[in-house]
């Protein structure tokens, strides 16, 4: 729990949380002064950016918005066209029946960015062609 005193002391948006470790002794929990520990949890503001990307059947980008380019450090979305999504988000599973995937994307400099990916798969019943939307 964050106390108001600790919030005032921290000039950032950090919070302090204290937790007491307890040991179990004969079906009752006893607080032990020797095992009590304090944990410090730092939080920081998070920016949420929603982006859209459409892939062909082979997983190459053929449509992306400028938000995706900005997120990954590219100047414009035209730089992303034709790139395989697995080069940008190596752990994403396109054909898996996973509703939401928590993976890391790689920006232009190779740094990891945690992202949440939702894959929508469309199939053409006549040609068996697949289209993925992220």
Image (cartoon, rainbow, N blue to C red):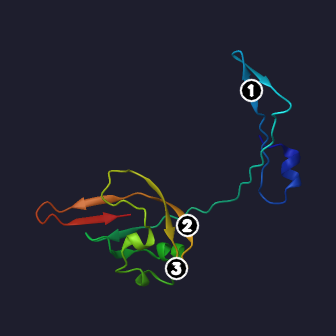
Residue at 85% over, 33% down = 34
Q: CA distance from mark 2 to mark 3?
A: 11 Å
| 32 on left or right of 92 | right
Q: Earlier in the sequence, mark 2 or mark 3?
A: 3
**Is disc 3 placed on a helix, strand or loop?**
loop
Quadrant in which the C terminus is drawn: bottom left
**Around disc 3, counting alpha carbons within 10 Å, would you say few (fewer than 14), some (14 to 19), or many (20 or more)?**
few
Q: Position of residue 30 (x, y in %)?
A: 78, 22
Q: Earlier in the sequence, mark 2 or mark 1?
A: 1
Q: Position of residue 53 (x, y in %)?
A: 39, 69
**Is disc 2 placed on a helix, strand or loop?**
strand
Give the residue furthest to the top.
26
Quickly name the residue at label 3. Answer: 108
Quickly name the residue at label 2. Answer: 113
Quickly name the residue at label 1. Answer: 23
**Front position among marks 2 and 1:** 1
The quadrant in which residue 18 appears is top right
Residue at 28% over, 71% down = 56
Q: CA distance from mark 2 to mark 1?
A: 38 Å
Q: Position of residue 99 (x, y in %)?
A: 38, 50
**Front position among marks 3 and 1:** 1
**Around disc 1, counting alpha carbons within 10 Å, would you say few (fewer than 14), some (14 to 19), or many (20 or more)?**
few
| 6 on left or right of 124 | right
**Around disc 2, counting alpha carbons within 10 Å, would you say few (fewer than 14), some (14 to 19), or many (20 or more)?**
few
Comparing 120 with 85, the one in front is 85
Q: Earlier in the sequence, mark 3 or mark 1?
A: 1
Contact? badges 3 and 1 (CB < 8 Å):
no
**Is disc 1 placed on a helix, strand or loop?**
strand
Residue 8, above or below 58:
above
Quadrant in which the N terminus is drawn: top right
Comparing 72 with 48, the one in front is 72
């Amino acid at each position: 729990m964050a106390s108001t005193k600790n919030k005032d002391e921290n000039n950032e948006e950090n919070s302090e949380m204290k937790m007491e470790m307890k040991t179990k002794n004969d079906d009752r929990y006893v607080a032990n002064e020797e095992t009590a520990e304090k944990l410090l949890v730092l939080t920081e503001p998070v920016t949420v950016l929603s982006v859209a990307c459409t892939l062909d059947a082979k997983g190459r980008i053929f449509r992306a918005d400028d938000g995706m380019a900005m997120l990954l450090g590219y100047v414009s979305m035209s730089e992303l066209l034709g790139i395989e999504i697995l080069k940008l988000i190596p752990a994403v599973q396109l054909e898996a029946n996973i509703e939401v995937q928590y993976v890391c994307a790689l920006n232009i400099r190779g740094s990891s960015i945690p992202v949440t990916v939702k894959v929508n798969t469309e199939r053409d019943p006549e040609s068996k062609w697949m289209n993925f939307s992220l």
